[in-house]
Image: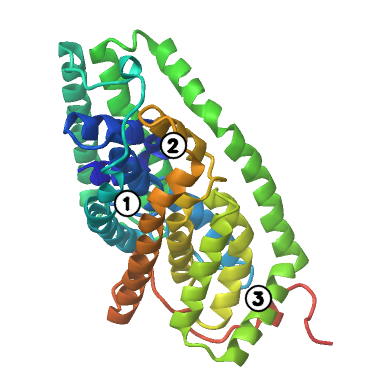
Amino acid sequence: MLLFVAILSHSAGDTGYVLVIPLGAIIFATAGRHPLLGIVAAFAGVSGGFSASILPSSLDPLLQGFTQSAAQIIAPTRIVNPLCNYYFTSASALMVILVGWWITDCVVEPRLAGVELDGDDANQPGLEPLTSAEILGLSGALAALLIACGLLVAGAWAETSPLRNAKHHLFDHDSPLMQAIVPLIFLLFLIPGIVYGYLSGTVKSHRDIVAGMIKSMGSMNYYLVLAFFAAQFTAAFRDSNVGVLLAVKGADGLQTLQLPPQVTIVGIIIISAVLDLVVGSASAKWALLGPIFVPMLMRVGISPELTQAAYRVGDSCMNIITPLMPYFPLVVVYCQRYVKKTGIGTLISLMLPYSLTFMIAWIGLLLTFWTCGWPLGIEGGYTYPGAIELESAVKLPLKP
């Protein structure tokens, strides 16, 4: 259940790091199990399984934007659906839960059996009963969410719905529903949050709502700076034709090696995983790698959607063993509440079985999807049909 909640937290961005992980320690301690076990299990689900989600998350349109811009370097009309990996990430959620469950019980818990707790019991958080106001707020928030989802389904159900495209399709990339995926995620979190705030008494007026939004957006400073430079980087690749040249040379090298496409994809996963050890941000890495990997693999017939899925696998698995991940020191602090001698090395040694097993199982899941021909998501195929003459996609000829 803890791993399942950790997976669900991906829909709320980085909230799981500050909410689910410390909650995992409390739940396990209350159940008579080692609190560090709850921390590492929650950390594995929140961060190690970051690209696994049964609900659309903010990461889907974020990566899709970079993937589409990279694909348009050589195919200006190429469109990528925001949910192109949705089926794969949904199946990945089940894999992370089952594999993480086995590692927690069979591998990590025996290692923690002799680790004594020496934290300050007086300062330990605990599970407190919900107040009547909190119960009312949660009930109202759930009702508001169900009503909002019902209105969305009712509005999209009819064949003539304005949320459908000209072909009356609901999930194509050009449908208004897909174009509005970001504001829809925002509203489906905002409405229940406001209802909970008013009913529980934590929100008194619209000023409290604005103050809460300002506080939440304060953590976006890093991303806004990153997005600015990432946009310049992508534009430079597009306008200078450097991305096209790298795609041509890289694709020619791959064609010379004559590697099976499955081997190429596993190579992309490994490269992404290695870079994740030094660059923690998923969007930062994809802003750098996307303009290179996507057109290069399109050149050898691999779709942008498959390249993005491979990147997401490599990006997730190593998050939990790199101290350069922004939230890694915070998790160490959580552990030190219960075992004071916990350090970076201790946490890495506990997370290493999750990281390696997730990597192997996730690669196997992706190759299984590919072998069976199951779609990765909505408009998410595996091949990019036709040989692309990149000379026609650049401003200056590549050949004299």
For the residue labelled by badge 1, is the local secondary structure a helix, a strand or a loop? loop
Residue 349 lies, with reference to residue 118, above or below; the image says: below
Q: What residue does disc 3 label? A: 247
Q: Which amino acid is tagged 3? A: Ala
For the residue labelled by badge 3, is the local secondary structure a helix, a strand or a loop? helix
Question: 66 or 258: which is nearer to us?
Answer: 258
Mark 3 and mark 1: span between their CA atoms?
31 Å
**What is the residue that sits farthest to the right in this orientation?**
400
**Res 115 → quadrant:** top left
Residue at left offset 26%, top offset 41%? 5
Residue at left offset 60%, top offset 36%? 222
Q: Which amino acid is tagged 2? A: Thr
For the residue labelled by badge 2, is the local secondary structure a helix, a strand or a loop? loop
Location of the N terminus (image quadrant): top left
Crowdedness of circle 1 by 10 Å Cα count: few (<14), some, many (20+)? many
Crowdedness of circle 2 by 10 Å Cα count: few (<14), some, many (20+)? some
Residue 239 lies, with reference to residue 375, above or below; the image says: above
Q: What residue does disc 1 label? A: 53
Q: What residue does disc 2 label? A: 342
Residue 327 lies, with reference to residue 384, above or below; the image says: above
Q: For residue 75, say whether it is visible.
A: no
Does label 2 or label 1 sit earlier along the sequence?
1
